[in-house]
Amino acid sequence: MAECATPRLLLQGFLQGAPPARPLFLPIVFAHGARIENVPLRAFLTNPTKISNSLRQIRARLHVDGVMCYFDPLLEAEALGGTVQRETEDRPPSLRWPNAAPGGELPEDLRSPEDAAKHGRVGVAVEVIRRLKSVLRDDCLLMAAVSGPFTLAAMLTQIEGGDTLRAQDISVSALDLATAAISPIAKALLEAGAGVIFIREEVLPALSAGDVSDWAARLATTINIIRFYQALPVLLLPRAGSAAANREAVVQQHWDCIVCPALDATAPDWPAGFGVALPLEAFEPGDSGSAMLDEGIRRIISGPLPAVVTTAGDIPATTDMERLKKVWGNLHSR
């Protein structure tokens, strides 16, 4: 593998349509920083200094191609006017609205997309990127994440994702608002210096070819903005089931970004030019996780090189970092 294939050069090659000399290894490691700083996650998420310090340590330890400067699935919903409630550290947070609406409908009195980009913890994320840009410079890529339109629309209307979810179950008005809200938040992160923006589509209904075209059109504005800033857009499909169900329609669609579906042992591999997201279960303690990780690595390095190797979400704080280093070592030796 060519040692000159730095993260920045690889990113430039991707933007110009060149085949990758090697995959960009961009695992999502963010909440682990709270453990490093020995603070509760809720305090960590609002403290740019602790976030920046911990990410510098993570980068020094892993030597990966990028660091995740901010990752919180509730970022946009909170910026639009929701309230995040974290009862305990071991339970997922919940989202509440001041003027809640019945399920399937938008809450009242939401902020405009332009105002949302200036509220909530968007400013914290922007500050972290600015600080790390001045410290890390071009040593690695600075990453951030925004929600996809289906995911944010489902969150706003309190619709649960699942295998039975259909595209028509999510209202057009919710999709329109979600689509409009994502772009200005992504722009704020890019202006701060982000080089990679993940668009997380965790809630993805079964889509026809026409539905995929409409979905791609909704993503196009955000993707174009990301590319305008000479950054890499990565569409993350972290649920293996939903990605596999839509595989044929997704493959046939032209994407101006890197699509990273979750690795699924039961599904066929995705074509060259796509990426891959390693399942979080592969990093859980125990032999089963190790076996799953080893099999995933074998599949990746034995086939066509993926453009990006990432994770299907934020690596748990209890993860053994040696497993991540093992993935990187195997990819780098290809």
Image (spheres, rainbow, N blue to C red):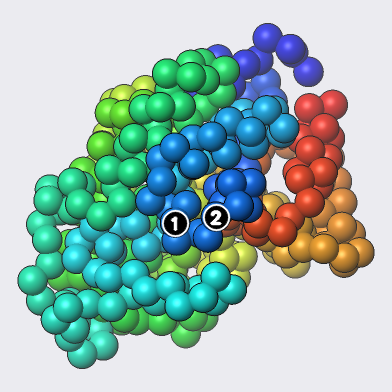
Image location (x, y in percent) of residue 206: 45, 73
Q: Residue at the location (41% across, 46% down)?
A: 47
Quarter where residue 23 is shown: top right
Instruction: Give the class, few, some or many, for how many residues have Cα within 10 Å of label 2's Cα (few <14, many ≥20).
Output: few
Instruction: Give the class, few, some or many, for how many residues have Cα within 10 Å of label 1's Cα (few <14, many ≥20).
Output: few
Q: Tell me how far mark 2 sits from mark 1, CA to CA.
A: 6 Å
Number of labels in the image equals: 2
Q: Looking at the rendering, in which quadrant would you find the C terminus?
A: top right
Query: Is residue 274 left or right of 102 when viewed as pictured?
Result: right
Q: Residue at the location (78% across, 27% down)?
A: 332
Q: Is residue 226 visible?
A: no
Kindly identify which numbered label has been placed on residue 87. Answer: none
The residue that mark 2 highlights is 39
The residue that mark 1 highlights is 43
When the figure is inspected, residue 170 is found, relative to residue 305, above or below; the finding is below
Q: Amino acid at mark 2?
A: Val
When the figure is inspected, residue 298 is found, relative to residue 104, above or below; the finding is above
Q: Is residue 322 visible?
A: yes
Query: Is residue 189 left or right of 41 when viewed as pictured?
Result: left
Q: Are marks 2 and 1 in contact (CB under 8 Å)?
A: yes
Q: Amino acid at mark 1?
A: Ala
When the figure is inspected, residue 60 is found, relative to residue 325, above or below; the finding is above
When the figure is inspected, residue 136 is found, relative to residue 89, above or below; the finding is above
